[in-house]
Image (cartoon, rainbow, N blue to C red):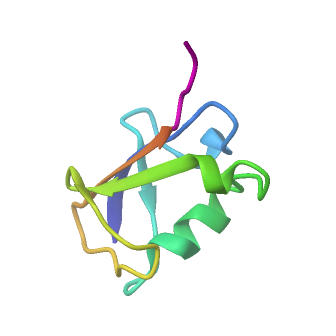
Amino acid sequence: MRVQVFVPAFAKIELLDEDNFIELNEGCSLRSLQRKLRVPLIYRPFVSVLVNYDKVSLSTKLKEGDVVSFYTVVSGG
């Protein structure tokens, strides 16, 4: 199945095609995608993940055509 992914700069973007799609096994979870993209463990607590623009848990199973967006939490003053 193919899903479109918008990842932070520190992920392994080489796995995505020119339109930001990645090929995954059926039933792949968001957590598996995060591992496949090699999002560093140190950054994972600071990354929010949306599927089809809704915040979901990492155990969410992805479906063909889903849009996955990774956002880093920013703080400051």
Q: Quadrant of residue 20?
A: top left
Name the residue located 65 percent from the left edge and 55 percent from the top edge.
Answer: 44
Residue toward you, 19 or 8: 8
Q: Quadrant of the N terminus?
A: bottom left
- Which residue is the extreme one toward the bottom? 27
Q: Residue 76 in magenta?
A: yes
In the image, is 76 to the left or to the right of 65?
right
Name the residue located 57 percent from the left edge and 75 percent from the top edge.
Answer: 32
Residue toward you, 36 or 58: 58
Residue 66 position (above or below residue 21) = below
Q: Name the dominant secondary structure of the magenta segment.
A: loop
Name the residue located 21 percent from the left edge and 61 percent from the top edge.
Answer: 65
- Residues drawn in magenta: 73-77
In the image, is 23 to the left or to the right of 37?
left
Q: Quadrant of residue 19?
A: top left
- Tell me where residue 49 appears, x and y as whole percent: 42, 54
Q: Quadrant of the C terminus?
A: top right
In the image, is 36 to the left or to the right of 2?
right
- Tell me where residue 9 appears, x and y as whole percent: 63, 30
Residue 62 position (above or below residue 11) = below
Residue 35 position (above or below residue 21) = below
Name the residue located 60 percent from the left edge and 47 percent from the top edge.
Answer: 46
